[in-house]
Amino acid sequence: MDEISKIRQLLEILTRNALKEELEKIATTDERKRIWALCNGLRSTEEIAKKVGVTSRTVQRFVKELRKADLVTIEKRGYPKRRFDYIPSDWGVEME
């Protein structure tokens, strides 16, 4: 299991730039970047909307784009979760 964990870490490092580029094609505003950071599978789209200060529909539309790009999953209805636990450090986004 330790070896698998090391391999995963290495792959994440190697693909970080490509993932960031893909994310930045979709997360084009500060609000969208915050939504991405808050998609941890524990918050509903309504909770995310309140924290970001946008409408639930705005979050739902963005999550739909993320799903289309295969960047989030919905394990529990209305609770989006990032497929990759990565938030670019230069985004300056806090994960409240």
Image: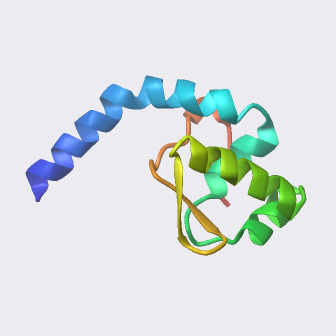
| Residue 34 horizontal side relative to residue 79, left or right | right
Question: Residue at left 52%, top 46%?
Answer: 71
Q: Is residue 94 above or below residue 30?
A: below
Residue 94 is at least partly visible in this image: no
Image quadrant occupied by the N terminus: bottom left
What colour scheme governs how the chains and residues are painted in the rendered image of this protein? rainbow
| Residue 2 horizontal side relative to residue 70, left or right | left
Question: In x, y percent, where is residue 39?
Answer: 61, 58
Question: Residue at left 79%, top 34%?
Answer: 29
Question: In x, y percent, where is residue 8?
Answer: 24, 44
Question: Residue at left 67%, top 44%?
Answer: 65
Image quadrant occupied by the C terminus: bottom right
| Residue 35 horizontal side relative to residue 76, left or right | right
Question: In x, y percent, where is residue 58?
Answer: 84, 53
Question: Residue at left 51%, top 45%?
Answer: 70
* Residue at the outermost bottom position: 76
Rendered image quadrant of residue 95: bottom right
Rendered image quadrant of residue 7: top left
Q: Is residue 3 above or below residue 88?
A: below
Report the number of discs: 0
